Image (cartoon, grey):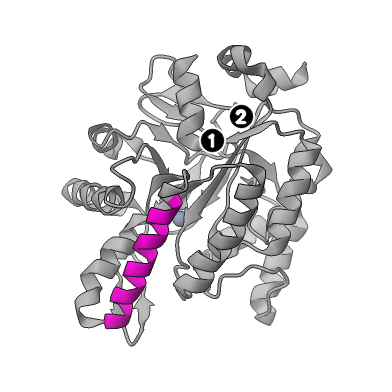
């Protein structure tokens, strides 16, 4: 009974005709390189996706891949002077095409820092400035959405229906709402209810978002509006133990990874202020994830003791490890998952109900 309260009556109504499918699982992946040292496309994209696709096939599951389309645009821009990059771009493009033709969803993921990034000496140089869309003018935002979505549409027969903001930096939503409508993208999956990040160059605050399976909205994805034309499919939140942040700090200090993630790059570090805030125990609500550094939470008692009708577990191919999928499989058994669907697949069910 408590579960119905946690996940909202709205979800109950939407699924009343399909109770036999519940609980439902959505697995989403942010398909991208690292933003400090990019790492290779083989280790950050191709190899881990192969692992995930084998798992998905076994489970008869379709995955939503939110593709960092700015990467494709930047590769195209820099390729004329770098034959190796041209080859990588061709490989990545056909990889995305193969994901789409295998029935997986391709969603739009926007990291605008690609606008200022250049390829020199066989590596990406990330400027480090202008990480969020709010750092760009309205005209620039418009060009970004047009070019990034066009780069993706080419690879999946124009079928782009879902959006995830880079670094979850979805606000201010009114900057992009019109553009998303124009592109026919009316499903968002950028909210992790309860999570907050206050970094110097990026941030979000989802403390007011409801912890529900989904909701409609119009002006802001954290403010449900039953008449809204957008649907939010939030990522299931998970409360990380304090030891998680101390463990990550220790890894950075000793320069040695303790998890089996496949990706060979390096993330941009959080600012000192945010690191200290987290080490002190603030901001521990995070996304439920199959990323190797976080996947342990899938099996934490406090995670799956809670009854939910819909779980959305996200991750990044670059952070996937073999342990991720073993844990996901056990998680699916423990939560008695009946079916899996994509982000837009879930939105279709909601709209059809
Ligand atoms: Zn991302």
Q: Is residue 328 above or below residue 279?
A: above
User: Regarding mark 2 in the picture, which secondary structure is present there?
Assistant: loop
Confirm whether residue 280 shows in the render.
Answer: no
Q: Residues within 10 Å of mark 2 (few under 14, many from 20)?
A: many
Disc 2: which residue: 211
Q: Residue at x 28, y 33 (%)?
A: 184
**3D distance between C-alphas at marks 1 and 2:** 8 Å
Q: Is residue 182 above or below residue 121?
A: above
Disc 1: which residue: 234
Q: Residue furthest bottom?
A: 121
Contact between marks 1 and 2 (CB within 8 A): the answer is yes
Q: Counting residues from the N terminus, which is met first, the one under dot 1 or under dot 2?
A: 2
Q: Nearer the viewer, residue 20 or 244?
A: 20
Residue behind label 2 places its C-beta within 8 angstroms of ligand 1: no
Q: Is residue 187 above or below residue 324?
A: above
Q: Nearer the viewer, residue 203 or 289?
A: 289
What percent of the width, then of the height, locates residue 243? 77, 59
Q: Main secondary structure of the magenta part?
A: helix
User: Regarding mark 1 in the picture, which secondary structure is present there?
Assistant: loop
Q: Residues within 10 Å of mark 1 (few under 14, many from 20)?
A: many
Tell me which segment is drawn in magenta. 83-99
Tell me the quarter of the picture where residue 159 sits. Answer: top left
Confirm whether residue 301 shows in the render.
Answer: yes
Left or right for 22, reference 273: right
């Amino acid at each position: 009974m408590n579960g119905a309260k946690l996940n909202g009556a709205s979800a109950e109504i939407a699924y009343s005709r399909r109770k036999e499918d519940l609980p439902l699982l959505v697995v989403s992946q942010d398909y991208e390189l690292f933003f400090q040292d990019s790492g290779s496309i083989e280790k950050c994209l191709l190899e881990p996706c192969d692992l995930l696709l084998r798992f998905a096939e076994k489970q008869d599951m379709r995955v939503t891949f939110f593709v960092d389309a700015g990467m494709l645009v930047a590769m195209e821009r820099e390729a004329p002077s770098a034959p190796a990059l041209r080859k990588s771009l061709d490989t990545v493009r056909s990889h995305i095409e193969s994901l789409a033709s295998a029935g997986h969803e391709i969603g739009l993921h926007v990291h605008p820092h690609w606008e200022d990034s250049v390829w020199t000496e066989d590596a990406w140089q990330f400027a480090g400035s202008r990480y969020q869309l709010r750092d760009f003018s309205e005209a620039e935002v418009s060009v970004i959405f047009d070019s990034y979505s066009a780069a993706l549409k080419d690879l999946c027969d124009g079928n782009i229906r879902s959006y995830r903001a880079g670094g979850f930096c979805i606000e201010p939503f009114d900057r992009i709402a019109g553009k998303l409508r124009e592109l026919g993208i009316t499903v968002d999956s950028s909210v992790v209810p309860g999570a907050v990040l206050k970094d110097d160059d990026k941030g979000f605050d989802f403390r007011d978002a409801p912890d529900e399976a989904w909701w409609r909205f119009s002006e802001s994805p954290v403010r449900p509006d039953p008449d809204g034309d957008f649907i939010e499919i939030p990522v299931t939140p998970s409360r990380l133990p304090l030891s998680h942040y101390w463990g990550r700090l220790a890894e950075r200090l000793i320069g040695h990874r303790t998890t089996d993630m496949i990706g060979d790059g390096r993330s941009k570090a959080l600012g000192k202020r945010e690191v200290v805030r987290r080490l002190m125990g603030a901001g521990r609500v995070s996304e439920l994830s199959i990323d190797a550094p976080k996947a342990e939470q899938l099996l934490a008692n406090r995670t799956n003791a809670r009854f939910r009708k819909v779980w959305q577990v996200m991750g990044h191919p670059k952070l996937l490890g073999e342990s991720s999928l073993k844990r996901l499989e056990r998680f699916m058994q423990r939560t008695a998952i009946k079916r899996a669907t994509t982000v837009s697949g879930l939105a279709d069910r909601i709209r059809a109900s």
